[in-house]
Image (cartoon, grey):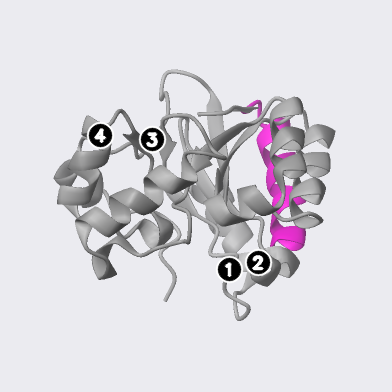
Amino acid sequence: MYVFRIPGIFPVLFPNWKWLGNKEEKAVYLTFDDGPHPEITKWVIETLAAFEAKATFFCVGENAQKYPDIIRLVQKNGHKTGNHTHNHLKGWENPDADYIENVKKASTPLPGNLFRPPYGRIRPSQAKKLRNMGFEIVMWSLLSCDYDPKLNREKSLNKLIKHTRNGSIVVFHDSEKAFENLKFILPPYLEFLKSNGFEMKCL
């Protein structure tokens, strides 16, 4: 079972985390997790450019260190980067001190205050510490589930289109395991957004 749309109870339970962008603007906030990747992230950047779209890339620190030229390419094209830990850690499975240090390590190649926990799994105590350090915890309202090789791609695309609203924060992945799904879903979704007057903005 896929959860394409975040249940409304989560923003109520965790109101200090960002689940939605500006609802007053006809805008959608595209995000890409787990990169950068030397080929896939370039493809994403080129695809976004074709639709005059901007996005936020939540990058894994070790990938950012490995491919600094791709980070520069992301920024050169008017996109933003965010911190996704250095080693793609699950907050639930790591002590707070270790988790925070891993986020700090990723801050060297990925300066800025945007942070998204891998898998969305973070303890409130970890989130509180990061917020006290100046980070904004960014979650999402719509998830493409493109990371699953068994995904029904048409269903994913249809769900994204059905549930897109002003301020939607949408998650994709610029990773190898997601690429085939991403190639199917992203271009027609961007076409839907553009043809329906949605601006595609960075967070």
Magenta segment boundaries in residue numbering? 182-198
Q: Which residue is mark 3?
A: 20
Separation of residues labelled 4 and 3 (CA atoms): 17 Å
* Secondary structure state at the residue bearing disc 3: loop
Q: Position of residue 193 (x, y in %)?
A: 66, 36
What amino acid type is highlighted by mark number 4? Arg
Is residue 142 shown left or right of residue 91?
right
The image quadrant of residue 2 is bottom left
Give how far apart the Cα atoms at labels 3 and 1 are: 22 Å
Q: Say which residue label 2 marks.
A: 178
Q: Residue at x 83, y 41 (%)?
A: 46
In-front residue for pair 145/1:
145
Pointer 1 or 4: first along the chain: 4
Of pointers 3 and 1, the one earlier in the residue sequence: 3
Residue 120 position within the rendered picture, expressed as x and y whole percent measured from the top left: 36, 57
- Name the spot of residue 24 as percent of width and height, x first: 42, 18
Q: Residues within 10 Å of mark 4 (few under 14, many from 20)?
A: some
Q: Amino acid at mark 2?
A: Ala
Closer to the N terminus: mark 2 or mark 4?
Answer: 4
Q: How many marks?
A: 4
User: Mark 1 highlights which residue?
Assistant: 147
Q: Is residue 26 above or below residue 18?
A: above
Whether residue 47 is visible? yes
User: In the rendered image, which residue does mark 4 sit on?
Assistant: 131
